Amino acid sequence: MTAGVDGMRDTDRRERVRRAWQQLATAGARRTLARGMVIDALAGTSAHLSITAIHQKVAEQRPEINISTVHRTVAFLAEHAVVHQLAWPGEARYGLCADPHVHAICEECGTISEIPAPSLAHAVAAAGDATRYDIGQAGLTLFGRCPACR
């Protein structure tokens, strides 16, 4: 197994890309260059990136793709639950949707950690059953201080 960008294993990155495209195909969305570049940028890191950071990664390979295209593409991917948005002072952060997880954000340094939470899927399903909502996305964000900032 080889490590890719930001230590992400290539097999993990490929699986994240595959799931994103599968989700878009299920929704009837077509493949475009911009969607592929944004998905690749997010799949290659475990970090949550701002639009500016996503654009920088995309522009390294395709400088003709401008930041407004990245912004529209991220909005489209969020509408289709391929990416999720974390509210952030100044500029929102985005990451690929994955298995149910919780975000823990350090209030001092801004580090974002994803914590697997398989029981979150059960809680979301129960909430959907109780309210009769068709819940497309759910999230839980915890704020505190990371080990490095304590």
Image (cartoon, rainbow, N blue to C red):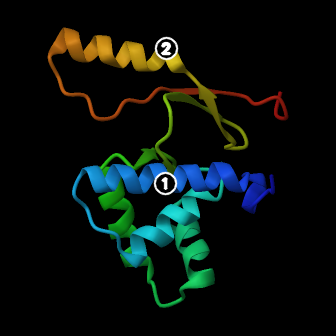
Q: Which residue is mark 1?
A: 18
Q: Is residue 93 visible?
A: no
Counting from the top left corner in percent of width and height, residue 75 is at: 33, 59
Residue 73's place in the image compared with 46, above or below, is below
**Three-letter code, disc 1:** Arg
User: How crowded is the residue under tag 2: few (<14 C-alpha within 10 Å), some, or many (20+)?
Assistant: few
Give the mark, 2 or 1, whose residue is nearer the N terminus.
1
Residue positioned 22% across, 57% down in the render: 28
Residue positioned 49% across, 14% down in the render: 119
Residue 36's place in the image compared with 80, above or below, is below
Q: Quadrant of residue 132?
A: top left
Q: CA distance from mark 2 to mark 1?
A: 24 Å
Lateral position of residue 32 relative to residue 133, left or right? right
Lateral position of residue 127 relative to residue 85, left or right? left
Q: Which residue is mark 2?
A: 119
Residue positioned 42% across, 20% down in the render: 121
Q: Secondary structure at mark 1?
A: helix
